Every structure is written in C-alpha cells, then in structure tokens.
Amino acid sequence: MRRRRQFLVAVSVVTLLVAACSDDDMGDTASSVLDDAQDAAGSVADQAADAAGEVASDAAEVAVRNVAASAGASEFDKAGSPIDGDLTCETDASGGADAIKVTCSGSTTSGGAAEMTGTTSEAPGASVTEIKGEFVGTVDGSESFRVDHLGA
C-alpha cells in the first residue's frame, strides 16, 4: 500500500510538471534552440568566408611578389641597369586583389640603388609569369623604366 501511495504521488507530480510545460512553452523552447543553432551556423560561415578571403589575398600577394621580383629584374636589365642578386619585394593587397601595391628594391651591378614601385590593375592568376598595372623603376632616384605590365 505504501508503495502504491508513493507511486500515485510520483505520477501526480509528473503530471503537474508536464501540465506546467504548455505546448507554447515547448514551441518557444524549440524555436529558441533553432534560432541559436542558425545564429551559430551563420557565425561559422562568416568566419570561414573571412578566412577564405584572407587566404586568397595572401596567395595573390605571393604571386605578385614573385612575378615582380623576377620580371622587375628583367626590366632593369633591359634598361641597362642589371640587378646584382635578387630584388626584394613587398606587397599590400589592402586595396583588393586587383589593385595590389608592390615595392621592390635591390642594387645594380654597378652599385646603384634600384627601386621599382607600382600597382597591379588585375587580379593575379591569369598568368603566373605576367602582371598588368603601372610600374616604375628607378636607379639612384632617376627613372630607368615605366611599363604597363611585368613579365612574359
């Protein structure tokens, strides 16, 4: 008998608890959980898109830096001021992948200070040996060449 009374009390408590959670509350809870999951998924997607953009920007900078170092040295050579060793180039893609700023420096075989500056006018990748844009090379501050593409 005592067990039966405990059972009936437990069933009554459970019934009251279930009744206290109306269908509206359960719907609200499910909706809230769904909203939270959607917000989290959106946040993860945004972070992934940002990371992908950074990777693409970094890859574009590397491509421009490599082409500029090699092709810039060739332009100095054509202008009669061959480079001693390699040009050292830095890039800045903050203007977008189709407007990457590049600055290269080095020394000529005669000891002159060589510098090339410019900005690409297209996203790199169409060619791994050429970039389009405006580029100016100077030796000891005097213009040595001005071209609208580097390479190829």
Image (cartoon, rainbow, N blue to C red):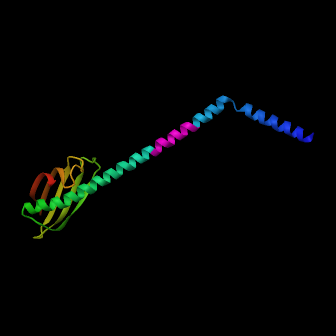
> Which residue is painted at 27% across and 54% down in the image?
61
From the image, which quarter does the N terminus lie in? Answer: top right
Q: Is residue 100 above or below residue 78?
A: above
Instruction: Residue 112: name its quadrant.
Output: bottom left
Question: Residues in magenta?
Answer: 33-44
Q: Position of residue 38 (x, y in %)?
A: 51, 39
Q: Please tell me whether residue 43 belongs to the stretch shown in magenta.
A: yes
Q: Position of residue 26 (x, y in %)?
A: 65, 33
Instruction: Residue 13: name its quadrant.
Output: top right
Q: Position of residue 126 (x, y in %)?
A: 22, 49
Left or right of 54, for residue 138: left
Left or right of 30, for residue 99: left
Name of the residue lying farthest toward the left = 80
Q: Please tell me whether residue 36 belongs to the stretch shown in magenta.
A: yes
Residue 41 seen in the current view = yes
Q: Is residue 34 above or below residue 64?
A: above
